[in-house]
């Protein structure tokens, strides 16, 4: 879900909520505040999250492997 889809859902929720009876100015103010909050949230898609999670898992695995190699090399030098 991208930020535009989130904004559309918020707009629909506001129209169906008790806030719908507020003045147009108040609704506009609330909408702009929610949009600013979403923009600052720095959201990512599920796909991007999964890609980054996989990359992190591979990096952590490689780190463990390299740490083991370093440990073996240090043992050989002693």
Image (tube, rainbow, N blue to C red):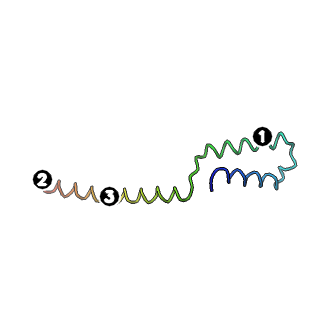
Please provide percent x and percent y for residue 45: 57, 55
Which SS class for mark 3?
helix
Determine which of the numbered discs, if any, sits on residue 29 in the image: 1
**Quadrant containing the N terminus in the rendered view:** bottom right
Q: Earlier in the sequence, mark 3 or mark 1?
A: 1
Residue name at image x 67 percent, y 50 percent: 4
Tell me whether circle 2 and circle 3 mark residues in contact (CB < 8 Å).
Answer: no
* Picture coordinates of residue 63, whole percent (x, y): 32, 55
Q: Is residue 33 above or below residue 47?
A: above
2 or 3: tag closer to the N-terminus = 3
Query: Taking 69 as reference, is 38 above or below it?
Result: above
Q: Could you give the CA–CA distance between mark 3 and mark 1, rounded to whole angstroms?
A: 50 Å
Classed neighbour count for the residue bearing mark 2: other residues with Cα under 10 Å, few (<14), some (14–19), many (≥20): few
| SS under mark 2 | helix
Q: Which residue is mark 2?
A: 77
> Circle 3 is placed at which residue position?
62
Structural distance between the alpha carbons of marks 2 and 1: 68 Å
Q: Which of the marked residues, 2 or 1, is nearer the chain's N terminus?
A: 1
């Amino acid at each position: 879900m991208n930020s535009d889809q989130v904004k559309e859902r918020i707009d629909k929720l506001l129209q169906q909520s008790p806030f719908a009876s507020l003045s147009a100015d108040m609704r506009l103010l609330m909408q702009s505040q929610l949009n600013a909050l979403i923009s600052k949230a720095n959201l990512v898609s599920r796909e991007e999250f999964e890609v980054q999670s996989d990359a992190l898992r591979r990096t952590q695995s490689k780190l463990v492997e390299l740490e083991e190699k370093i440990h073996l090399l240090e043992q050989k030098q002693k």
